[in-house]
Image: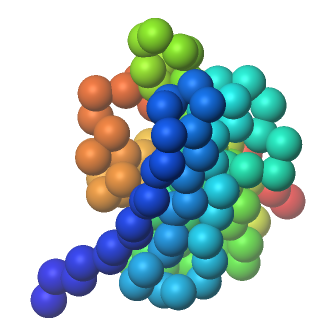
Amino acid sequence: MATTRTATTNWEGSLMEGAGKVNLDSSGVGTFDLTWPSRAESPEGRTSPEELIAAAHSACFSMALSHGLAGAGTPPETVRTSADVTFQPGTGITGIVLKVQARVPGLSAEGFQEAATTAKENCPVSQALAGVTITLEAELLD
């Protein structure tokens, strides 16, 4: 069964001088401030579309990797993923770097690289961001 998640943004003013709030409607977990400077310069306690994309991508990738590993008979003990989303004003999102560290008993480093690559290619957020170069750095922990 398909699910739909909703977020709403209310923006007031021009791009450069204005500000907005993005509300995570489906979960109700929060409302977050955003401005152009928080997107193109320093966050200073506010978020940006790129940070929200990074959150979605790191979560989706971690879930996809965990699922793939468990399905192959090597469930992970831990998976920690960060996503660095680069935004260039005037150009847009220019790249994403996924960095994952995981502890997976009984799995070789080669097997982990294969599982991580498969998760990167098949994670629904990766697929939604197919127009952006996505780089993977995967490290199997002892």
Report whether 139 appears left or right of 52: right
| Outermost left residue | 1
| Outermost top residue | 90
Which percent across, then down, holds residue 105? 71, 72
Which percent across, then down, holds residue 39? 63, 33
The residue shown at (84%, 42%) is 44
Residue 8 visible in the current orientation: yes
The residue shown at (72%, 61%) is 80
Report whether 48 appears left or right of 131: right
The residue shown at (30%, 57%) is 124
The mark tally for this picture is: 0
Question: Could you say which is closer to the camera, residue 57 or residue 23?
Answer: 23
**Which quarter of the figure is the C terminus placed in?**
bottom right
Q: Is residue 135 above or below residue 56?
A: above
Q: Is residue 103 above or below residue 109?
A: below
* Snapshot colouring: rainbow
Question: Could you say which is closer to the camera, residue 132 or residue 141?
Answer: 132
| Outermost front residue | 13
Question: Could you say which is closer to the camera, residue 114 or residue 101?
Answer: 101
The residue shown at (61%, 31%) is 17
Which percent across, then down, holds residue 126? 36, 46
Residue 108 visible in the current orientation: no
Report whether 105 appears left or right of 61: right
**Which quarter of the figure is the N terminus placed in?**
bottom left
Q: Is residue 66 above or below residue 96?
A: below
Corner quadrant of residue 50: top right
Which percent across, then down, holds residue 33? 65, 56
Q: Is residue 69 above or below residue 16?
A: below
Question: Could you say which is closer to the camera, residue 66 or residue 74?
Answer: 66
